[in-house]
Image: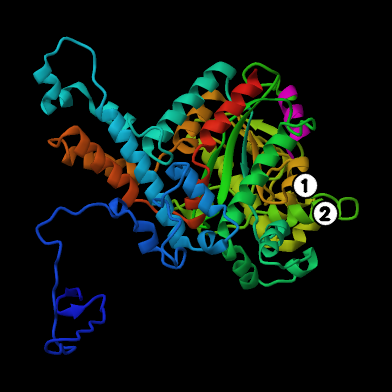
Amino acid sequence: MTNHVQNKLLFPTVLHKIDGPAITSEQIVNIAPGEGKIPVTPYNEPNWEALAFVKQFSEGKFHFNSERKQKITPIKYAQTRLKCCDSRFASDPQYIFGLLNWVEKETVYSTINFVERKRKCGPSKAADVQNNSTFKSLISDAEIFASFKKIRGTPQYFKNMMHDILAKVRQFGPPTFWITFSDAEFKWTDIIKIVARQFGENLDDSTINSMDWSSKVKYLKRNPVTVARQIDYRFSQLWGKVILGGLHPIGQILNYDERGEFQDRGTEHIHAPVHVENAPTIENDSREDVISFIDKYVTCSIPDKQLHPELNKLVNSLQTHHCTKTCKKKKGIKCRFNAPWPPTEQTKIVFANEDKKSLDKANNCINKILKEIQIIGDAIENFDLEQLLDSAHVSREDYDSCLDIMYKRCTMLYKRKPNEAWVVPYNTVLLNTWCANMNIQYITGIYGVIAYLTSYLTKPERSMSELMRAASKEAASLPIKEKLIKLGNVFQNSRDLSTHEAIVRTISILYAAQTLMFNMFLLD
């Protein structure tokens, strides 16, 4: 059988005909056994898994639809397959994406079947209940969209999450810190060690550290499920054993929420607003108390190389900002993170300044200092603040006054020496424990954090929201079930996912609910 597009073979298939006239390569044969029929999902085929993945099921047995004494749900089956000691399943990205698509489709159809059975109370006749138009009038578009709020990754899921976080902000007030943790699978030798042991190899740290990038990639690709599970395990241990443990590296935690994101790199990083017990706020406490609290938990200093060699190495390699293409997402902005940051001898609270004239004057002065830092380059290590100001021909009085009026909104300026202008804020205990890039910021006010929480932490996939809204309008005249199916298909077929995210969604489908329960127990 061959398919053709404009008389060109798109996916050629060999035809072997025993009887009858021979078919030459110039001839095009079009065979359409499904013409005039309604297409059905391949998951209706009892042996779909064995037929689609021959390498994994070479004998055509032991797939999901095989007979078993004990029935198993699709989610449990998918998790069991990916966690299996046989790496045939976990090492094949196509199989991982196939499982995710199947599990989510089962979840979507289960949701649709539940919604279809819903009926609102009220006076009605038997004929009204059977009439689809009457049924359609009983369910609004908002309720149709809300039907998908339990499915991870949908815009409705993140909207529900947003409401939960806003309720906590109302209960506890604004969060104290905003923390970001990135992973470093190429630097964490334990991950490659675990993958290697699955294949009978025992590697030590020196061997792994001497590997080039391509060699490490080969090990990480041998079992990406193990890599994803180990990264998830490290995150859980960071929260359970360090941040929420007896060390209290950033204070006694009242509550936290986290959002995992998978950007261009593909692996996961975490954003988390954290409420700290008895943390001072700018609105209710003195400036000195707030600054003292921040300096206790947050720093931008480069540790002494002789006294703290390991921490010095971590700060220089992980916490020093280097501008990349992500820094210039917005036109006309040199770095959307505002790096480098102006040096100051003490942590400052810079209150909002709405006067455009003074803002421009202050920024011109500060930019002159920052430009001088870049011109000096590596020699900046030998400069103190006074020497830097002299080199830039800026007086100390002008510099200090400009620092106090340089932002449109209330902002923290952390204590930095001139050679620390590129250092991202960190916590010494967390950085020493995590051994990967992190960022910790003190939150200055409730209005800014609510806007940031609703636009960033709980942001849905914007393109997904627009696609689902457009699909809802196109399907306005369809019956409820068909409309829900159309929305579900848009969600499943219009996303960009990395292999790592597909694994996390498949094997950690209940992670959000477990985190919420953990927070509730923590509060009790």
Q: Quadrant of the N terminus?
A: bottom left
428, 89: nearer the viewer: 89
Residue 432 badge: 1
Classify 10 Å Cα crowding around label 2: few (below 14), some (14-19), many (20 and above): some
Seen from this angle, which residue lies furthest top?
Answer: 123
Residue at position x 39%, y 44% in the image: 104
Seen from this angle, which residue lies furthest right?
Answer: 307
Q: Where in the figure is residue 523, as x and y percent of width and height?
A: 64, 20
Q: Is residue 312 left or right of residue 224?
A: right
Residue at position x 61%, y 72% in the image: 214
Q: Where in the figure is residue 33, as x and y percent of width and height?
A: 14, 65
Which label's residue is closer to the chain start, 1 or 2?
A: 2
Q: Which residue is mark 2?
A: 310
Q: Is residue 50 left or right of residue 267?
A: left
Classify 10 Å Cα crowding around label 1: few (below 14), some (14-19), many (20 and above): few
Q: Where in the figure is residue 463, as x and y percent of width and height?
A: 33, 46
Query: In this rendering, is residue 263 above or below 124?
Result: below
Q: Magenta part of the protein: which range?
A: 289-299
Q: Quadrant of residue 226?
A: bottom right
- Dot 2 falls on a residue whose secondary structure is helix
Query: In this rendering, is residue 162 above or below 94?
Result: above
Q: Quadrant of residue 323?
A: bottom right
